[in-house]
Amino acid sequence: MSGFGFNISKSSTIEYKPEDFQLANIIEENEPTSRLCISCGSCSATCTGSEFAKLRMHYIHLYVKRNLTDKIREELQNCMFCGKCQLVCPRGVNNRNIIRLLWENI
C-alpha cells in the first residue's frame, strides 16, 4: 500500500504534567476573570509599554497556560502597570491583578 498518498506521522500532542498547571491554577483561583480572555489583542493595541518594548498581555495569558515562566518574566519587565489594558478589555479581564499575581508567584 505504499504510495497511497498518506503517511503515518508522529503525534504532536504536548504531554503536560500536573505541576505545569500550578501557576495557571493560582491565577484562576485569585482572579477568575482570567478565564474570560479571548486573545483579541485590544490590551496590547492600547498598551503604552508595547509601543516601545515587547509587551503583549494576550501572549502572557497564553504563556501562563503553557507554564512558560521565562517568557512571562520577559514580557512583565516592560509593564508600566498603568491599567490601560484593563480599561479596554471587551471581556472585563482584570489584567492589573493578573500582572500583580504573576510577579508574586514567578
Image (cartoon, rainbow, N blue to C red):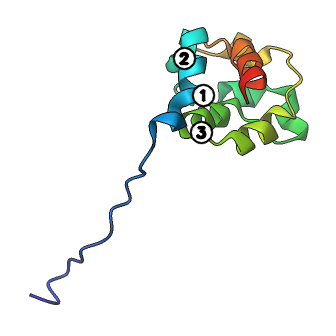
Residue neighbourhood size for the residue with mark 2, other residues' Cα within 10 Å, grouped as few (<14), some (14–19), many (≥20): some
Q: Position of residue 64 (x, y in %)?
A: 60, 33
Please state the horizontal and vertical placement of residue 75, each as a whole percent of the image: 78, 37
User: Is residue 91 visible to us here?
Assistant: no
The front one of 101 and 50 is: 101
Residue 86 versus residue 35: which sits nearer the camera? 35
Helix, strand or loop status at disc 2: helix
Q: Is residue 9 left or right of residue 34?
A: left
SS at mark 3 in the image = loop
Q: Is residue 14 left or right of residue 56?
A: left
Left or right: residue 7 compared with residue 22: left
Q: Residue at x 78, y 24 (%)?
A: 103
Q: CA distance from mark 3 to mark 1?
A: 7 Å
Provide residue 104's location: percent of width, then percent of height: 77, 20
Instruction: Label 1, secondary structure: give it.
Output: helix
Q: Which quadrant does the N terminus fall into?
A: bottom left
Name the residue: 20% across, 77% down.
Answer: 6
Corner quadrant of residue 46: top right
Q: Position of residue 57 (x, y in %)?
A: 70, 30
Q: Report the residue at 55% width, 28% height from top.
A: 22
28 vs 40: above or below: above
- Neighbours of disc 3 within 10 Å: few (<14), some (14-19), many (20+): some
Marker disc for residue 67: 3
User: Distance of mark 1 from mark 2, alpha carbons?
Assistant: 9 Å
**Counting residues from the N terminus, which is met first, the one under dot 3 or under dot 1?**
1
User: In what quadrant of the picture does the C terminus appear?
Assistant: top right
Residue at the disc numbered 1: 23
Q: CA distance from mark 2 to mark 3?
A: 13 Å
Identify the residue position indicated by label 2 in the image.
28
